[in-house]
Image (cartoon, rainbow, N blue to C red):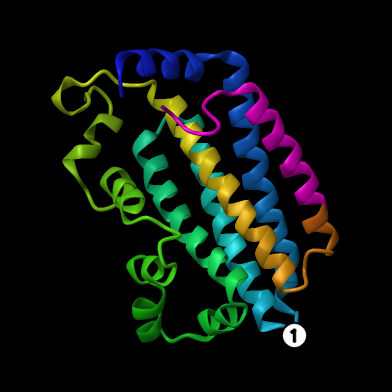
Amino acid sequence: MTTSNFDSSKEALLDQSAQRARREACRMCANRLQNCGNVLWAFGLADDTRRRALATVLQIGGSIARGNVAMLEAENWYAAAALCRQLVEIEYLVWLFGTNPSEAEAWLSATQEDLRPMYSPSAMRKRSEGRFRDQEYWSHCELGGHPNPKAAFLLPEHILPNDEPPLPTPEWMWVDLGQHLERLWLFAEVATKTLGLDTVRIVADARRDIENVLQRWHERDACADGLT
């Protein structure tokens, strides 16, 4: 990142209107995703196995996302990074369910022995044929996977490797979370439509609320499309 790009990104990250918009987007997306999962699950009474699979993954994703928001609000940066890495894996599954609905049923009924070779992060990236990048997931693993000294700057009184000038930690983490939640919702929209669930009221309401909050975020936050 050049000095001019660093300065412009830092300025955008610290803009108070942008901060409010990115936090609002993260909270809304996290809550609506979990609400969709809870209603689609409906005590697990639905006969459609594919619906139960998608509901389960959305419930997990919503729980992770809400936990991520809570960790960011508590300034627990390392825990937030760990949860965001898990959220990436939810993206993989929801994308897969929307691409091939039979995978939802296969995932829900898979044995523990089958889950790793078929649905592990590395296997899913290969199956995506380039849709998901290795480097993106590895970067998240470095910050929130197995203990790694590279992630130490997320801990109290630590600094970035090589004394690099840091971007405001809480703000770029909010941006990163928002971008993953936006992508997850796009996959969820496709999956609900593919499985014939897009007309369920909770899904339709979530679509309206999330589209509105994401629009406000992109209008007010220069970082919403990515840090330069």
- Residue 120 picture quarter: bottom left
- Residue 29 picture quarter: top right
User: In the visual, does 211 lie left or right of 136?
Assistant: right
Q: Main secondary structure of the magenta part?
A: helix
Relative to residue 65, is residue 39 depicted above or below?
below
| Relative image position of residue 137 (x, y in whole percent) | 35, 53
For the point 40% across and 61% down, which residue is it?
Answer: 130
Which of 171 and 75 lies nearest the eye of the viewer? 171
Is residue 165 on the magenta stretch? no
Query: Which quarter of the rendered picture does the N terminus lie within?
Result: top left
For the point 42% across and 72% down, which residue is it?
Answer: 127
Is residue 216 on the magenta stretch? yes
For the point 66% across and 66% down, which residue is it?
Answer: 191
For the point 59% across and 45% down, which residue is it?
Answer: 182
Query: Which quarter of the rendered picture does the C terminus lie within?
Result: top left
Report which residue position mark 1 lands on.
47
Relative to residue 10, is residue 197 depicted above or below?
below
| Relative image position of residue 91 (x, y in whole percent) | 51, 58
| Relative image position of residue 150 (x, y in whole percent) | 20, 38
The part of the chain drawn in magenta is 205-228
User: In the visual, does 223 lie left or right of 191?
Assistant: left
* Tag 1: amino acid: Asp
Which of 50 and 187 lies nearest the eye of the viewer? 187
